[in-house]
Structures are given as C-alpha cells and as structure tokens.
Amino acid sequence: MTKLGEMKRKDVVRVLNERYFLRLLQLGPFERRARGWRFGTRVVSDRIVEHLIARGKAEIEGSFLRLKRKETA
C-alpha cells in the first residue's frame, strides 16, 4: 500500500474521506431519508454512499447503509 506522502493531493483527500465515513459506519448505520442519506444530523451525499458500495465496503439493508459483513468460511 502506498504511503499518503507519495500520493497526489486529490487521492489523499479521497482516502481520508473514505476513512472518515467508514469510521462513522462503525458507530452506526446511515439512514436513507427523503433528501439523501443521514448519520444523525449529518448529511451524507449519494456520491459517498455509491463510492463505499462500489468499493465493497458497505451494503444497503432496507433503508440503512451498513458496513459490509465479512463472510465466514
């Protein structure tokens, strides 16, 4: 894995953003509302949610976005 110092600025911001939202998901799920996703009073954009799902980090269960569960073998 590359160190943050070797990455371009926009890539560093993307990684830090992803870590931030993954930490929020560890605390609890995001809830789907009429105007987008929410974590408490914080609004979470559809773009962030789509990114987390595309990377396989999160999944939608009903009206909630949760961390993706690790499959047990």
Image (cartoon, rainbow, N blue to C red):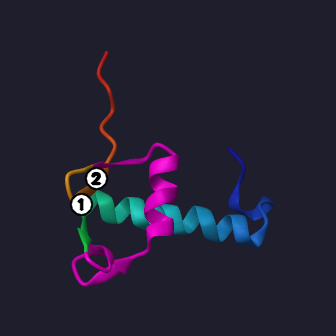
Disc 2 residue type (three-letter): Arg
At label 2, counting other C-alpha atoms closer than 10 Å, the crowd grade (few under 14, some 14-19, many 20 or more) is: many
| First in sequence: mark 2 vs mark 1 | 1
Q: Quadrant of the N terminus?
A: top right
Task: Give amino acid for label 1.
Answer: Pro
Does residue 37 belong to the magenta stretch?
Answer: yes
Q: Position of residue 47 (x, y in %)?
A: 51, 67
Contact? badges 2 and 1 (CB < 8 Å)? yes
Q: Residue at x 36, y 62 (%)?
A: 23
What residue is rendered at 24% in x and 60% in y? 29
The label shown at residue 29 is 1
Looking at the image, residue 49 sits to the left or right of residue 72; the answer is right
Determine whether the residue tagged by mark 1 lies in a helix, strand or loop. Answer: loop
The quarter of the picture where residue 25 lies is bottom left
Residue at image coords 43%, 62%: 49
- Picture coordinates of residue 46, whole percent (x, y): 44, 69
Residue, disc 2? 66
Kindly indicate the quadrant of the structure image that contains residue 45: bottom left
For this rendering, which residue is in front, 24 or 39? 39
Mark 1 neighbour class, 10 Å CA radius: few under 14, some 14 to 19, many 20 or more: many
**Magenta region:** 34-60
